[in-house]
Amino acid sequence: MYSIRIEGNFSSAHNLCGYQGKCEALHGHNWKVELTVSRSALDKLGMIFDFKTLKAMLNDVLEKLDHRYLNSTPYFKKFNPTSEHIARYIYRCLKPALKKCLVSVTVWENDSSCATYCE
């Protein structure tokens, strides 16, 4: 099995509804996002997926979140904008295009805290 991972980033603000603590107040993060894809076989060029294409796909999703107040976006009006829900949102946006090779999305809200979503 072969796997590759790329990274992207975005900046946004949010607040955690119902949270008892500082994160209930409006605050922001410079999020780092890791995308992992995997396949058992390589294509005729010897790749799982072209890094350039994969980065463009991730950036298209992240652009919708960049410099936004996440709580006001349609998806996060239904789901509290936690790192876990952000990872799931990004994963589900990419899943139709990446079908069987998408493994996981990891969202880092700072250098020591992240959440991963996979199916």
Image (cartoon, rainbow, N blue to C red):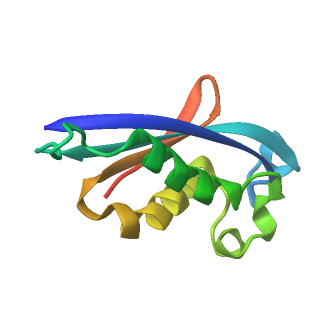
Q: Quick one: which residue is furthest to the front in this view? A: 45
Number of marks in the rendered image? 0
Q: Is residue 37 shown to the viewer in this render?
A: yes
Q: Nearer the viewer, residue 24 or 48?
A: 48
- 35 sits to left or right of 59: left
Q: Is residue 56 left or right of residue 10?
A: left
Quadrant assignment for the C terminus = bottom left
Residue at (24% x, 39% y) in the render: 47
Indicate the position of residue 26 as horizontal and vertical percent values: 88, 50
Give the residue displayed 70% in from the left and 76% down from the top: 74
On the image, the x and y values in percent for residue 94 come to: 45, 62
The answer to whether residue 102 is above or below residue 27 is below
From the viewer's perspective, is residue 60 above or below residue 75? above
Q: Quadrant of residue 70?
A: bottom right
Quadrant in which residue 28 is drawn: top right
On the picture, is 41 further left or further right than 77? left
* Residue at the top extreme, as displayed: 111
Residue 1 horizontal side relative to residue 108, left or right? left
The residue lying toward the viewer, choosing from 10 and 77, is 10
Q: Quadrant of the N terminus?
A: top left
Q: Nearer the viewer, residue 41 or 33?
A: 41
Residue 109 percent across, percent down from the top left? 65, 36
Residue 21: in sight, yes or no?
no
Residue extending farthest right: 26
Compare residues 44 and 48 and report the one nearer the observer.
44
